[in-house]
Amino acid sequence: MEWTPELMQKLESLRSKIEDTGQDFETYVNGWQQQQFQNYWDYIQLDTLLSLQRPVTQVADEPIFIMYHQITELYFKLTRLEIDALAGSVEPDFTDFLERIARINRYFDALKHSFGVMELGMKKEEFLTFRDALAPASGFQSVQYRIIELGCAPVINIVAEGKREELREASVENQMDSIYWKDGAKVESTGQPAYTAVQFMEKYWDDLLFTAEAYEHCNIWAKYQGFKEHWSEDQRSELEDALRKLDLNVNVYWPLQHYKTAVRYLSKKPVDIQATGGTNWQKYLPPRFQRRVFFPELWTAVQIADWGKSWVHEILSELEK
Ligand code: HEM
């Protein structure tokens, strides 16, 4: 390679960058000389990644269960990056806002389409063998899932449905006390909170309260309200389409795909199999019953009344067979 004037210019500006902070350029050049070339396995931490699957039984299909949960958690982390970028945005940059919502939708589309890895990809008898060794652990305890919800919409929209009206003007802290998953995950026979929820709250409740308060004025809906005056009718309409899709992805499509999976593994006549988290999952999980809607302002009353209905009918009729 030649020492062209352009290359010399780049080196010069690099040198200025370092010397402008009062540091020595030559020290950096010596450091570069010593540095190893980057390789793929270190860069993506492959060895560490592959060491994170630790089955607790000898059952062959258990690694599938662990890995797909891990894959999902990584998609959740990607989603959180976009939520936080939106929460921190100060300029009403329409293209950026729309693209970030589209990214989240792509992540959830990927999760929705790949859920067959869980629904169809394990032998039922193997699942039912290794699952007992996991109790009371449950995906219910996924804190990232809860954080995503808090980052998308005002807490009131994910308060247990029956308490939304009375708590509409309440503080975030009071609303959090009736958040759907705290209110709804009960042991069917006693009506007491399921231990999986008790355990989860012991670990994360304070953090989640803090998170809810931190997102109060900068969740996705709050940001949209703050920026929309700057955008044209067409832009708003395009963004609202993307937000509706996000609402369906997180609150209907993913939960239903997940529910279908629970049905495949846990439903049994005459009495369903107890979930590892021990909840009343048949009543608790279907979106039709929880009716979480991030952006109710974007739906008609009929659409909200029918939230998740058609799919649930399909699944319930499968259960009847
Ligand atoms: C064979 C696969 C699966 C089955 C049978 C299953 C079953 C269940 C059940 C029964 C519940 C209710 C709580 C309980 O009693 O345990 C639950 C909750 C949950 N699971 Fe799964 N699950 C599966 C896979 C997954 C995967 C891959 C994820 C991804 C992280 C996940 C995330 C969740 C979440 C976030 C909840 C709470 C949902 C809510 O509060 O509405 N699950 N699961």
Image: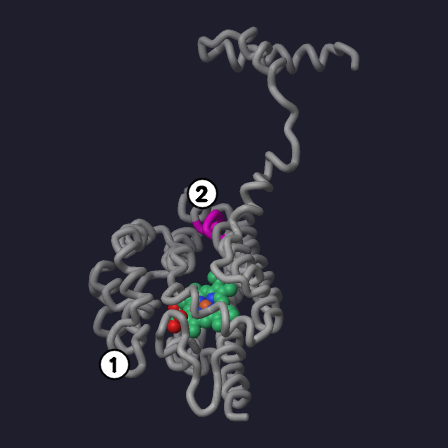
For the residue carrying disc 2, how many other residues have a C-alpha within 10 Å: few (<14), some (14-19), or many (20+)?
few
Position of the N terminus by quadrant:
top right
Residue 255 in the image: state x and y as whole percent.
48, 71
Q: Quadrant of residue 148?
A: bottom left
Visible in this render: residue 297?
Answer: no
User: Under 8 Å from ligand 1: the CB of mark 2?
Assistant: no
Disc 1 or disc 2, which is closer to the eye? 1
In this rendering, the answer to whether 223 lies above or below 19 is: below
**Helix, strand or loop under label 1:** loop
In this rendering, the answer to whether 187 lies above or below 79 is: below
| Residue numbers of the magenta segment | 79-83
User: What is the image's colouring?
Assistant: one colour
Residue 277 in the image: state x and y as whole percent.
37, 70
Kindly identify the amino acid type of the residue bearing the numbered disc 1: Thr
Residue 251 in the image: state x and y as whole percent.
45, 69
Position of the C terminus by quadrant:
bottom right
Visible in this render: residue 141?
Answer: yes
Q: Which residue is mark 1?
A: 190
In this rendering, the answer to whether 30 lies above or below 53 is: above
Task: Indicate which disc, 1 or 2, sits on the residue closer to the N terminus.
Answer: 2
Q: Is residue 308 magenta?
A: no
Residue under the image location 29 percent in, 68 percent down = 195
Q: Which residue is mark 2?
A: 91
Left or right: 190, with 288 as reference point: left
Residue under the image location 47 percent in, 9 percent down = 23
The disc label shown at residue 205, or none: none
Left or right: 81, with 38 as reference point: left
For the residue carrying disc 1, how many other residues have a C-alpha within 10 Å: few (<14), some (14-19), or many (20+)?
few
Q: Quadrant of residue 189?
A: bottom left
Residue 308 in the image: state x and y as whole percent.
48, 78
